[in-house]
Image (cartoon, coloured by chain):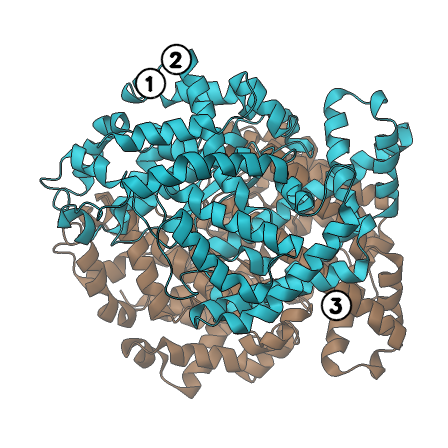
Chain colours: A cyan, B brown
Amino acid sequence: MEKYLQTYQDVRRKIIAFNYMDFLFSWDQETEAPSASHEFRSKQFQVIAEERYKLSSDPAFMEAVEKLYENLNELDDELKVEIKNEYKDLRWVKKIPKDEFIDFQVLTQNGSNIWQVAKKNNDFASFQPTLEKIVEYLRKFVKYLETDTLKGYDVLLDMYEEGMGMKEYDEFFNTLREELVPFVLEVTKDKPAKFSRKLTHSVFPREQQREFSHYLMDVFHYDKTKGLLKESAHPFTSGNASVDTRITTHFHEDHLVSSIFSTIHEMGHAIYEMQNDPKYDDTFLHGGTSMGIHESQSRMYENMLGRAKEFWDIHYAKLVELFPKQLKDVSVEEFVRYINTAKRSLIRIEADELTYALHIMVRYELEKLLISGKLKVKDLPKKWKQLMGQYVGIRPKNDTEGVLQDIHWSGGSMGYFPTYALGSAYAAQIYHAMNQDFNVLEAIKNNQIDQINAWTKEHIHKYARTKTPKELMLIATKEPFSPMYYVQYLKEKFSQK
Amino acid sequence: MEKYLQTYQDVRRKIIAFNYMDFLFSWDQETEAPSASHEFRSKQFQVIAEERYKLSSDPAFMEAVEKLYENLNELDDELKVEIKNEYKDLRWVKKIPKDEFIDFQVLTQNGSNIWQVAKKNNDFASFQPTLEKIVEYLRKFVKYLETDTLKGYDVLLDMYEEGMGMKEYDEFFNTLREELVPFVLEVTKDKPAKFSRKLTHSVFPREQQREFSHYLMDVFHYDKTKGLLKESAHPFTSGNASVDTRITTHFHEDHLVSSIFSTIHEMGHAIYEMQNDPKYDDTFLHGGTSMGIHESQSRMYENMLGRAKEFWDIHYAKLVELFPKQLKDVSVEEFVRYINTAKRSLIRIEADELTYALHIMVRYELEKLLISGKLKVKDLPKKWKQLMGQYVGIRPKNDTEGVLQDIHWSGGSMGYFPTYALGSAYAAQIYHAMNQDFNVLEAIKNNQIDQINAWTKEHIHKYARTKTPKELMLIATKEPFSPMYYVQYLKEKFSQK
């Protein structure tokens, strides 16, 4: 055992370093790498990826993981969790034939390019053969990886959110279908409200937007000694240690609130990882425990905190100070209504808080049908339009605004989308639990977001990956996950008109 | 042979990738890494350094280099040069006992910290034991590495500038001693001229300084698709491909010209590597051929181009536009005099173009004495003061401003300093040669620095590391190196008063 532990720790130390280099490389790539260097860089990255793969597929390392797994009871609690996770990940290397795995990687690497062109040209037919192959591989992999408890699509769902399979998600989405869909269709049936042209047609210079993002970093107590803010085409959070968790945002001069809510959203992700207990930095337990829990933090910071009237009551003055001409005569009330409008829309990433989960529900239904074999790829566009009409009350006129809008499937990701909706639902339940301990809006009004951070740290963040999402929800909210908090939250918020 | 070539190329491919990661890591470290992440990062860097060392000390790789070296005639010309260089580098691994090499590395890693404290406290005695050990090791290594033609200090000199030993440097510095020292002492004997307080006592906001640096990047045709400008404590150029060569500068609000000449100096380094033939990017032949040639480019761009009256005749207006209040009533003539003042000073990195080489001469003499054993470390401070008085005409009152001012020795670098002076001398000869082909000041006046870049590319840059400094000077100037161009250049420039 000592020997296996030693091997495990030696290789783990190296993998963590390679992961860090991987992070640095992508961070540089997305934020500043010179454009002419891409070809040269991708050759260097290829080498590092090969070395990284050698480490995790090293037979001595795999043997160590297996032996430690067979003797789990001899390990301390935290190492137990870590070894369980590693053993689970080993399945991909062990159960899937190497050739198929590599073919799939090549397929999905090219897939994004093919998808991009298809989306641009509104040409689903040119993407269809690729997507057919991807679905075919995923169906095969699912067979290889099935267990007594995980069947079919469950295998993929469980990869992104442990403990969530079709049974659990069906329950969740059924609740939304029954409780939320009729409510949303009712609330959004009228034409959306109009707002001052100053909000929708002004130019908001990027320098002032940047300054406001830095202001927000202070308001949210984002620790600038452990991270930084830069720009990238698509905002993201990146890093792999509590002491190094960086964020990006984007500045669109014709769309002020886009950078504001991107920055807050990414801070939600980042504060989660920054508040992980630092002792996990040198282990595989650092990070968020699941995609759903991660998204719960970004959504809670963005929507429950960042879109609250109480938040803008004290911070709107700063915004007006930066944009005095653009926001002249726009009251804080109008601004808050503006950032909380619900309407039927086609594009997921532009969807508002109310309708967002229904966009996800469309994707969940479709993935389930595809993996089960009940839906053919060629019939996807039609089915997409039908479900959009049913759940969101609006049908895309073309595939660019429909089935081709998201990158995920082209990269081989199925089972990931549902965690976005789940994250919002987790957020509502966590927010409710926090309010049992103290008045959150009161804290916001008093500019004490550090109090909120202290609560999320104590009840969620510090645990890093040592708890499963289910365990964490129990710890944080003292009850199992229930979608009713989400439904209640949305109904209450969007009934106040 | 085929087998050895294959091994060589395989390992080379990996080393280049690790070198690139090394570059990215340092770049991040110097320009933006969050301050609290240093300890975590250094652990990750340690792993990557270990893996990097494994590659170059891999017995199969070393064998391949040796076999290829034994069969040099079978290789094409460029690979010949590369293998010669690699074979030379192998000496360090092969001739120096591993234990001693590692001890030296630990010693010099800690050396910089000890030096830093000693410098701060003006306490040479606390640094003396460390420096004694460093000199002792260097004297030992020199013995291990001596050849028929390289003896003692030659071994170290040759590491930084192939073909330059004590014989060559003695000739060079003797010329400076005879021709330059009396001239400099004469020119600088009066109190330095006074300039408008607007130049010396204004505040120059960093944002405008940054804008001017970006303006300069355009003026010099620095290719922004292959690099970028950021800030760091000490300006540097970094990158390891023609398509990725980045620079930094610093902005001191009380010292406008510091950022200007740092930016131009680093662009000189960067344009050299950017204009390397890109085919060397995937080999060990990319880069500058020596420290001296590298410095010749940075010095030529900074001093001959950037400090010329003709340069400011057309670019001073932009500077005044950015700093209208600060430069009000300061004529371009006064500004040009200001940036070309010579005076006796104590600190090398603040020294002007005229006196700079004499600061280096002091260090050359001292290193030669230390490595030969004729000077003891304990007697260094006294000897330093004496030589400074003799060559620069000014004696430091304390060691902080004297023998403790530079970091180099604490890190184990001896033999490096002389290349700084040599670079300036190379620059004068190259500048003279270029003027035989076209009127350089005319090109500057017409804002055609691209014409200058085209010349340096054709005569120097494109060769990367395929030519030795000696070969390159012959190619670029059609004659062997001669310090007289440097002496003439300085005498002419600093006699015009």
Disc 1 residue type?
Ala
On the same chain, marks 1 and 3? The answer is: no
Q: Nearer the viewer, residue A258 or B12?
A: A258
How far across and how far down the image is residue B64, in percent?
87, 67
What secondary structure is marked by label 3?
Answer: helix
- Give residue A443's mark: 1
Disc 2 residue type?
Phe
In space, the residues marked 1 and 2 are separated at their CA atoms by: 8 Å
Seen in the image, is B255 located left or right of residue A31? left
Work out which quarter of the rendered image holds the N terminus of chain A and state it: top right
User: What residue did someone put label 3 on?
Assistant: B85
On the same chain, marks 2 and 3? The answer is: no
Up/down of A330 relative to B195, above or below: above
Instruction: Using the image, name the chain to which the residue with label 1 belongs.
Output: A
Q: Residue at x 22, y 43 (%)?
A: B201
Seen in the image, is B23 located left or right of residue A215? right
Q: Nearer the viewer, residue B354 or A372?
A: A372
Instruction: Using the image, name the chain to which the residue with label 2 belongs.
Output: A
Label 3: how many Cα within 10 Å (few below 14, some 14–19, many 20+): some
Which of the 4 image quadrants contains residue A335?
top left
In space, the residues marked 2 and 3 are separated at their CA atoms by: 69 Å
Q: Earlier in the sequence, mark 1 or mark 2?
A: 2
Do the residues under discs 1 and 2 have CB atoms within 8 angstroms?
Answer: yes
What secondary structure is marked by label 2?
Answer: loop
In the rendered image, the residue lying farthest to the left is A329
User: Foreground mark, 1 or 3?
Assistant: 1
User: What residue did someone put label 2 on?
Assistant: A438
Seen in the image, is A186 located left or right of residue B120? left
